[in-house]
Amino acid sequence: MSMLLNQPLKLLCFRRKPGLVRSSPPLSNGFSTSLLQTPPCTIIDADPCGRGLGKLVVNYHNEYHFTDLEKKVAMELVDIPMATIGSSHGWVATLKEDGILRLQDDLNPNASYTEPKRIPLPPLVTLPLCLIAKLKSLPMYRLKITPSGSTSESQTPASTPLVSCFRRNMTCFAYIIGSWDLHTDKHKIPKFQRLRFQNLPKLTKTKGELMDSCYKSEHLVESRTTGETFLVKWYRKAVWRGMSKLKTKALMVFKLDDKGNAVYTQDIGDLCIFLSKSEPFCVPVSSFPGMMLPNHVRLADVGETGFFKLADYSIFAHNTIIGPGYHIPPQNIE
């Protein structure tokens, strides 16, 4: 992959439709539906075509080359990291000088570029003082809200938005995890569960000190195909003095169960996890003909791309000057 990404972009761009697959994710009523889907892909760049627009360039993960699409997007979405603040199910969130948070489908390769969707969200408001006081009482509290969606693999398996909460216990190696459905649980108190980490790998002193010095982020990934839930810890360290780029130094995957056990694992079977600035997700590799790297974690961020091989704890990642750092999950074809 490093050889591929180091090649000149123009030599790797071909006009070709990605292979489509038919997926049958389980539904809440116990039945399944057969949907035509695009393969997962990574946003690579946009080829300027005038008036601040560019034609989107992506890498479908069942192909060995980049694909130059006809879809036009604003160049700032791929060239300026601060232009977007997150992504989920192919939607990106932008926050401009007017202070309005917007959702738009520009970076979704399957969405129409002649009729792009723009959804302005309600204005941001200041939290009540009583709520701020409660949040401050939770050390390192982080709240993540994920929108609904229907892909073959999704962080949010329900049909309604889900809130996932984590906080680091300051006295022991433990987390509290909980969920809250904004529709059905609106007037209920969220139920929290403390995670118990097990089967932790033995680290050398040097490796432990390196991981302690890294910037760490946690990502919850749920598989609709297998019904498994994973917690991924991503360790990165700043590189290149004077620049804010990060380089992956370690990664740990834990399999969660209903009893609060978080068991370290180096085997996720046929699944491949995708971590980026976007919502994390995973897909079964065998569902997409031509796709490789089962039991891997694919990585993408501003300035870095690569993958992590779980079986032997090896990292194949390098810094790059292209790409906004977004993986896009499979999209349904209607």
Image: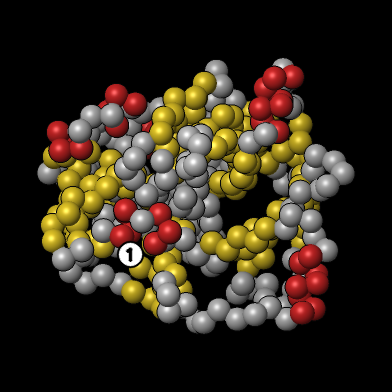
Q: Residue at x 85, y 41 (%)?
A: 172
Residue 280 left/right relative to 16: right
The residue lying toward the viewer, choosing from 172 and 215, is 215
Asked where in the image residue 150 lies, by quadrant, the reply is bottom left
x, y percentage for residue 36? 29, 51
Residue 46 left/right relative to 264: left
x, y percentage for residue 82? 43, 59
x, y percentage for residue 13? 16, 39
Question: Is residue 296 in view?
Answer: no
* Quadrant placement of the C terminus: bottom left
Residue named by callout 1: 105
* Quadrant placement of the N terminus: top left
Q: Residue at x 44, y 29 (%)?
A: 317
Color style of the picture: secondary structure
Kind of element beneath mark 1: loop
Q: Residue furthest right?
A: 171
Q: Residue at x 38, y 76 (%)?
A: 119
Asked where in the image residue 61 lies, by quadrant, the reply is top left
Type of amino acid at the residue the image marks with label 1: Asp
Asked where in the image residue 179 lies, by quadrant, the reply is bottom right
Question: Is residue 174 in view?
Answer: yes
Image vertical order of residue 46 relative to residue 236, above or below = below
Bin the neighbour count of mark 1 within 10 Å (Cα to Cα): few under 14, some 14-19, many 20 and up.
Answer: many
The residue lying toward the viewer, choosing from 258 and 74, is 74
x, y percentage for residue 137? 83, 63
